Image (cartoon, helix red, strand yellow):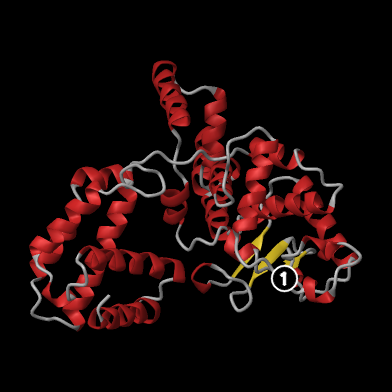
């Protein structure tokens, strides 16, 4: 970058961090888009960019081939890149170049086809509770590393914790008697610094038992409440581990994803990343929650302030289940509701609706 452009990029970085409150990951994605645009323009001053320059870059990114896959960039990458540049130039106009042609910024807008493709792209397959059970069953928990891996999968299934927060957990954050984990943002790397106490979801006692066994092994090796729940060095659970090793948490979530890949492979399953288990919990909640209050509690336990977040971001119905539901609705239209379907509707009904049904049936 030229010095002038680099100064603007630096100021914008501060704006995203302090004024918008974005995470480091989000800021990095915005800065990558700006750097890529600047390289394409060969360091042209941002204040001199015209519609023609923007259109040329837009054409370039639509035709660009990924160095990783050798294929054209995904629709999602294109939409996010152009959107980041739109945001950046709006900031430039508001704070640096009030005379800049605002209409030119609209030329960063991606084609409608690309935008629609990004929004409707096939979603990753979500593991079922049975898949997760197979993953854990494929692990030899009689070994130290096996027990650790099974405990990692178990606590994610029990709580829906994100892998970034998981690696920063300390032993003291696990509240065994209350069956909770305390995601204190002062010590745990939670999303957007939110404080959250998560009660274990009712997914099975076997997962609680594995987590309890891991805690026993950690403490038997001399770990204290202030030590990481999942330390970086595997030998920390062995008798010869040093105290220094016991104080080293994982530096990134990469090891968590690696152990998930290994567990999936051992179970003969396609790879499910750690975050996908949050989708599993949302789908499970649809089956077990009977009232609106229970649905709200389930959603809040995932860290969502609004139930719409749970439904929109995690509640996608895959194409196979979509087919099953619509086929069942078609048959229902022909034959009316069956006994099992009536029971399911009653289970999902609010207390007020159930009370109304009782009154109706008693008359």
Identify whether 150 is placed above or below 6. Answer: above
Mark 1: give few (<14), some (14-19) or many (20+) Cα within 10 Å: many
- Say how many tags the image has: 1
SS state under label 1: loop
In the image, farthest residue toward the front: 42
- Say which of 159 and 258 sits in front: 258
Residue 115: x and y, percent? 25, 48
Q: Is residue 242 left or right of residue 41?
A: right
In the image, 36 versus 10, the foreground residue is 36
Which quarter shows the N terminus?
bottom left
Which residue does the image show at 14% across and 57% down from the upper left?
A: 56
The answer to whether 189 appears left or right of 146 in the picture is left
**In the visual, does 91 lie left or right of 294?**
left
User: 207 or 304, which lies in front?
Assistant: 207
| 15 over 50 or under it: above or below | below
**Viewer can see residue 331:** yes
Q: Is residue 97 left or right of residue 87?
A: left
Q: Residue at x 55, y 34 (%)?
A: 344
Classify 27 as above or below 204.
Answer: below
Can residue 109 be seen by looking at this rendering? no
Q: Quadrant of residue 137?
A: top right
Give the residue at mark 1.
Answer: 170
**Residue 267 position in % (x across, y down):** 69, 35
On the image, the x and y values in percent for residue 265 come to 65, 37
In this view, which residue lies farthest toward the top? 334
Look at the picture and state if 58 lies above or below 75. below
Q: Residue at x 45, y 23 (%)?
A: 328
Image point 33% across, 46% down: which residue? 74
């Amino acid at each position: 970058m030229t010095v002038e452009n680099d100064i603007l990029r630096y100021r914008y970085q501060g704006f995203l961090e302090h004024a918008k409150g974005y995470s480091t990951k989000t800021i990095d994605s915005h800065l990558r888009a700006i750097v890529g645009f600047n390289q394409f323009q060969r360091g042209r001053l941002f204040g001199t960019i015209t519609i023609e320059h923007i259109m040329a870059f837009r054409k370039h990114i639509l035709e660009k081939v990924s160095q990783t896959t050798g294929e054209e960039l995904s629709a999602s990458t294109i939409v996010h890149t152009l959107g980041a540049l739109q945001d950046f130039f709006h900031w430039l106009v508001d704070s640096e170049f009030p005379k800049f042609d605002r209409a030119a910024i609209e030329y960063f807008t991606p084609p409608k086809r690309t935008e629609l493709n990004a929004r409707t792209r096939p979603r990753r397959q979500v593991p079922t509770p049975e898949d997760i059970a197979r993953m854990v069953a494929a692990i030899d928990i009689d070994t130290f590393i096996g027990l650790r891996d099974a405990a990692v999968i178990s606590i994610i299934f029990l709580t829906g914790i994100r892998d970034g927060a998981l690696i920063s957990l300390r032993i003291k954050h696990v509240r065994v008697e209350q069956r909770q984990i305390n995601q204190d943002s002062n010590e745990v790397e939670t999303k957007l610094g939110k404080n959250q106490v998560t009660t274990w979801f009712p997914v099975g006692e076997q997962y609680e038992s594995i987590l309890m066994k891991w805690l026993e092994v950690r403490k038997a090796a001399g770990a204290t409440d202030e030590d990481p729940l999942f330390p970086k060095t595997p030998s920390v659970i062995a008798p010869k581990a040093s105290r220094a090793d016991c104080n080293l948490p994982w530096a990134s979530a990469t090891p968590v994803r690696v152990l998930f890949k290994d567990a999936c492979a051992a179970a003969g399953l396609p790879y499910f990343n750690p975050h996908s288990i949050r989708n599993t919990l949302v789908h499970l909640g649809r089956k077990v929650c009977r009232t609106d209050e229970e649905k709200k509690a389930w959603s809040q336990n995932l860290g969502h302030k609004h139930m719409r977040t749970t439904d929109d971001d995690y509640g996608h119905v895959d194409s196979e289940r979509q087919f099953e539901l619509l086929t069942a609705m078609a048959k229902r239209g022909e034959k009316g509701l069956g006994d099992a379907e009536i029971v399911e509707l009653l289970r999902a009904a609010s207390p007020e609706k159930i009370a109304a049904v009782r009154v109706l049936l008693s008359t």
